[in-house]
Each structure stands twice: as C-alpha cells, then as structure tokens.
Image: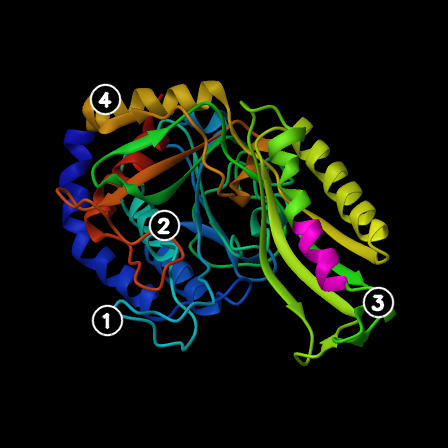
Amino acid sequence: MSSSIRPLIQAELPGLRAIRHDLHAHPELSFDEKRTSGVVQRELAALNIAFKAGLGGGTGVLGYLPASTPEGNKLKSVALRADMDALPITEETGKAYASCNPGVMHACGHDGHTAMLIGAARILSKAQRPQPVTFVFQPAEEGGGGANLMCKEGCLCGEISGGSGGGGGSGGSGGSGMGNPVGSIFGLHGWPTFEVGKVASKPGPILAATDDFTVTVRGTQSHGAYPHYGNDPIVAAAHIITALQTIAARNVGPLDSVVVTVGAISAGTANNIIPQEVTFIGTVRTLRNETKTLAKRRFIGITEGTARALGCEARVDYIDGYPVTENDPDATERFFCVARQALGGDKTERIDQATMGGEDFSYYGHHVPACFFFLGLRPRNAETYPTLHQPDFDFNDDALPVGIEMLCELALAK
C-alpha cells in the first residue's frame, strides 16, 4: 500500500508543514486548545469528514470515516489518536514560526502529532478503506488526563444508536462516540533519541504510571540560634527525602523499576528563623501495578514515620496519576508487521526496555486493544537533538511523512 499512498502524502506535505508551523506558533495549554480545535474542525469539514467537537473538557474533536464497502462497515473501527496541548515553557528555538504566546510552547511535539493526524485524515479520505476509521484529537495530555475524559464520554463506544456513521462534515457537540465502536487504537509520539525515518515499540509496558505527591512537614518554629526550642521541619524534610530513595534501593527488586523524584522544596523566610512548615513536591514512576501499590504504601509510611521520629508531623497528598501505558500484544504485532512492510526491517525497532515517562494514552488501553509507538525525530548523522520539554525543542518536519504513512497503513491493514 505504501507505494500508492506515498505520492499522496508528498503532495500534501507543503500544506501540512504550514499547518504544523501555524500550530507551533499558536500553542495552547491543556483544556484551552480552542484555536487548535478550530483548525482541526476546519480541516475535517473541508474533507467532508463527519465530526463531533466540544469533547474531553470542551476542546476535543472526534472524526469518523466509514469503510468503503458495506461489508467493511460491519467491522469495528480502527482509531488513531493525536494530542493537541502545549506546555508552560518559554520557547528558545529562534524559529520564524516560534511561539507567539509568551511562556507557552509546543515543547513536546503535539503540533506535529496533530498535523500528522490531519494528514492521515486527508489521505484516508481518498483511500479504499477496509474498515471504518475514527480520528481522536485529544486535549490535555500534559497532566490533564484528557484521554480519560474522552473515554468516559464514550469516544470509543460508537454511536449510542449503533449506526455506522459517515457523511456530513458539520460539527456538533455531545459526549457519545461516532459510527461503529472502536476495535483497536494506535497512537504515536515523536522521539528525539531515534533517528528520523525509524519507528519503535514493544509489547507490554512501554511507559510508566505517573503518580504525584505534595508533602507538608510541620514542626515548631524557633530562632535559628536556639533550635532546641523547636522542632526543625527542614531537617525532617531532608531526612524524609533521603529515606524515600530506599524505596528503590531496598523495597523494590533490583530488576523492577521505580523512580522517586522530589522536584521542588519550599520553606522559610529568613536565615535565622527555623520555619514552621516545609513543602516539597515530586513524582513516583512505576511499571507494574504491584510496584505502584508498594511504592505508595512505603512512601506514606516512610514520610509519616520519619517526620514523627524527628518531632514533626507530615501531611501527604498522594495523587494517583496516569496508569502504565501497556501495549496489547496483538495490536503491537500488527504495528510491527505494518512497519516492516511499509518502512522496512531496518527502520523498525523492537525496544527492550520501557521508558519512565508517562502518557495518558494509557487510558484507551483499558477499553480496547491499544498500541503506542515512537517516531524518530533525530536528524540523520546528528549525534544529539533537543529532547522533549526543553525550550529549544522543535518537532522535525522530516518525520511528518513517516508518521502519516504509519497512521494510514495501520488504518488500512486488513
């Protein structure tokens, strides 16, 4: 199929690059992707693809293309997903299309993801489709859990009436899905450590669960010269933070994976005052549900116990975040078969280890077989490339045709 769709992709690339640059110049934070959502709706309407808007907290868009044959329309849909939000980072790329919104930038490449799914919609609208295709343009991946909201609203469930969908091009609102129920879903993320032209994935866990915490340690305020009159929460917090590293070192097996990171500490007003409170925040990452449960239990026990031993009190606000992104074995094998056929075995990599980053794509896998894969961004012959969430990161336009081709081929595979 690649030989037939590649010329179509090449013909669309100039316009898709322009869309990507436009989205990059106008980034929007989670749940505020109004302009981005408008661009998506405009593009789907121009293709006469039926869609629903106003989903996932208000900015999500769901598009639907029926199969090309009556028999195909008896099958479940293949869903393709892109996230749309940006990050609260000040851009330092110096590009002509750099962010126009101060303090906000597409530092994770979601502008590229959105442009590629628009590109896939353009190509698939012209192709003979063996089964229906659902396009999931999702808000708020960066901490907002937009995928979870889209799932709760029924984006994978098809129409309540059970109809096959199709036609139209006019937007609408509401929380139900469209067309036939989704049978499998695929998503991707641009990945700077892989060379452009390559794709990579693995069955099973590929991205970590992402739990967050806020800890407040309360002691007794006193003069810095007379610490014996108080209970120092800074000393207690220092001991707690050090002790928390024993979760990885002494509570979890050496071949298992857990990360406990404290990202910020706040305390005090002057150099000669022992404050009453210390607050620190951070994240816990795990790859197995059993480890996630253990890490949470030990985190709370260590924090509260260490504070108490030093005459202080600790209040833990532990937030269960995104679950592990777990690739379905059959959906992942489908990805590998498609990738090898489309790109070649030398461009398809089966990775051994999961990464401890997180993704709310994980929620889709709780409802239907799902596969998430990485799309290479690093320029050929380049040793390094700015990585995700850095102020000098920019999605590599050379990866656009590869990502579009993979999305299309996954939708067209029988």
Q: In this view, does 357 lie above or below 32?
A: above
Mark 3 or mark 1: whose residue is earlier in sequence? 1
Marked residue nearer the N-terminal end (1 or 2):
1
Q: Which of 125 and 292 is in front in this view?
A: 292
Which mark is in front, 1 or 2? 1
Residue type indicated by callout 4: Gln
Amino acid marked by disc 2: His
- Mark 2 lies on residue: 113
**Along the line of sight, the residue nearer the viewer: 263 or 202:** 263
Question: Mark 2 or mark 3, which is nearer to you?
Answer: 3
Query: In whole angstroms, how far apart are the C-alphas of marks 1 and 2?
Result: 21 Å
Residue for point 81% across, 48% down: 304
Tell me if label 3 and label 4 are in contact, CB under 8 Å.
Answer: no
Local crowd size for mark 1, using a 10 Å CA cut-off: few (<14), some (14–19), many (≥20): few
- Pair 3/1: label in front: 3
Asked if disc 1 and disc 4 are in contact, CB closer than 8 Å, the reply is no
Check disc 1 and report the residue beneath it: 94
Residue 115 versus residue 369 in the image, above or below:
below
Assess whether residue 156 is covered by the magenta stretch: no
- Quarter of the figure with the N terminus: top left
The residue indicated by pointer 4 is 341
Q: Locate residue 191, reporting x and y percent.
A: 33, 43
Residue drawn at (82%, 54%) of the image: 310
Residue at the image point whose x is 52% and y is 43% from the top: 358
